[in-house]
Amino acid sequence: MIAWETSLLDWEDRIVAGKSMVPAPPLFPDVAADAMDVFSALRMVDADGSPLMGEACLPWVKELVATLFGSYDPERKRRLITHYFLMVSKKNGKSMMAAGVMLTALILNTRASGEFIILAPTKEAADNAYKPIRDMILADEELDARFQDQQHIKTVTDRLNGATLKVVAADSATVTGKKAIGVFIDELHEFGKSSSAASMLTEATGGITSRPEGFVFYCTTQSSERPAGVFKDKLEYARKVRDGEVIDRRFLPVIYEFPEHMIASRAYESLSNAYITNPNWNVSVDAEVIAQKIQEAEEAGEHALCDIRAKHLNIEIGLNLRTDRWAGADFWQQQAIEAFGLEDLMARCEVATVGIDGGGLDDMLGLTVIGREKETRRWMWWSHAWAHEIALDRRKEIAPRLLDFKKDGDLTIVKQPGHDVQALADIICQLNDANLLPEEKAIGVDPAGIGDIIDELTSEDRGIKIEQIIAVRQGYTLNGAIKTTERKLAGGEIVHAGSAMMAWCVGNARVEDKGNAILITKQASGKAKIDPLMAGFSAVTLMLLSPAASGKKYQLFFA
């Protein structure tokens, strides 16, 4: 019985030392050797001098390819490691690896009419993926005689057994019904932006369930936005397998990213450490070119720099920091404490105020509770949001993120209008029943969406008094709350539960300077959502009145 592991518990030491990141050697060395003979003989036409793959590829590539093909058990005719995940920085030869791996698989295939697929996120990416395959075939007389090149449909057909290798752009229609033996998914981070990507990838990779020799190879760089959707899911799973948190011997992760301590110390900012996520450093990755790109990005601003670091250093984007970002975004992440829920806030706080914002059919309805902690008097920030199912269709560009937030428990998807308002009212009544809400000016509501909410809250069953609800206008009215939140975040006087949804909203916020005031508006933020953040500013506005909990007298002010 063959034993192997796909975790790599010492990966942080190994990646800094430049050692192999492949957690398992070839399980069947003879099978791997035969495959590597084929792979190594392919020619890289677009490289200087048109070298063979065996001459041009560095050991890390050969090790990964050997493990992939060497996981096939020839006696049982079954592949023992079926899923592979590679994340490596841009310009490290992913496209060439895809071409070499998939063409090798096609050459070695013995299944009549077998199908192999390279799935690219766009038509342009598909064109780029097909070109090296075509060139490899045309550069070898034997391969050119054996394989038919159909460039117009990006398909290579084996004349011996009718097997095909197709490069297709992401489209559910193009992968429906496929029974692929091998699937190479290129630029997985781009698929994370599509709400339909998960079902599409399931369709594309479903064929290996009836193909015991089959495999799926996920290949990606880091995203220039916060990981989302299917990319976020696969990356998190790959990290858990690598770190030994999940035992899955059929899934092999190879992740070139900085260790956490180097992220914390910002060691990635030194070009001398760029080799860590660039195993082809000074080969296909030109150090001088990268240095120039970083210099240009530094001049262009933080957003450009974040983009470069994501693509060329695999730095995961935290907050989407732009030059017009809200100043509070710089301090938001550092104020996350151990995750807490509404019940924890209620137990620890002496008084609470509520902010509500949004609520259109294609919008988010945001609720934020600000609680004043009994002993420390610091403010605890807790948020939740709701979205209608229709928003997933109308807002396709953010649908993957909304579904991620649903998984986290920070967002509720509702089917019927009104269900969100009812759920929101349940939370507010819970606070009121606990005597945490002030007798007046406890609930700040954006005037644009106040009607349904007031009707629900002040109904006979709810028992919220009209005096507890106040309209908090956006624009200049929130200037004081915005600046106060900035200061309290910087000073450690506001804490939150580290919600990914709130980090996204904070990163989306855009500032407009109007004289001595700063404005954060939905118009400036564009399609990206900030509703729970705006709700938070409304709650802060009311907390600035120094309220007492229900039953205690206090001076009234106007928001």
Image (cartoon, rainbow, N blue to C red):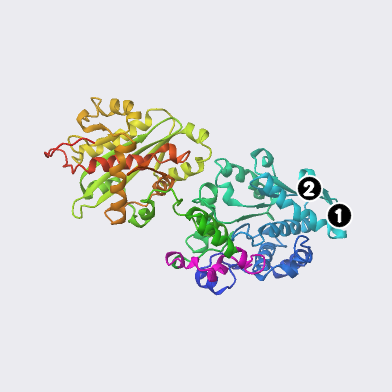
Residue in the picture at 29% in, 27% down: 456
Residue in the picture at 44% in, 41% down: 525
Percent across and percent down for residue 269 are 49, 65
Mark 2, other Cα within 10 Å: few <14 / some 14–19 / many ≥20: some
Using residue 455 as the reference point, say whether residue 183 is left or right of it: right
Q: For mark 2, give the secondary structure.
A: loop
Mark 1, other Cα within 10 Å: few <14 / some 14–19 / many ≥20: some
Tell whether position 559 is magenta.
Answer: no
Percent across and percent down for residue 166 are 74, 48
Magenta residues span: 262-289
Task: Return the mark for residue 146.
Answer: 1
Mark 2 near mark 1, Cβ–Cβ under 8 Å?
no
Task: Return the mark for residue 113.
Answer: 2
What's under tag 2, amino acid-wise?
Answer: Ser
What's under tag 1, amino acid-wise?
Answer: Arg
Task: Return the mark for residue 165.
Answer: none
Percent across and percent down for residue 259 are 48, 66
Using residue 411 as the reference point, say whether residue 230 is left or right of it: right
The image quarter containing residue 215 is bottom right
Q: Quadrant of the N terminus?
A: bottom right
Sooner in the amino-acid sequence: mark 2 or mark 1 = 2
Residue 77 appears in the figure: no
Q: CA distance from mark 2 to mark 1?
A: 15 Å
Using residue 199 as the reference point, say whether residue 428 is left or right of it: left
The image quarter containing residue 412 is top left
Residue 383 appears in the figure: yes
Percent across and percent down for residue 334 are 36, 57
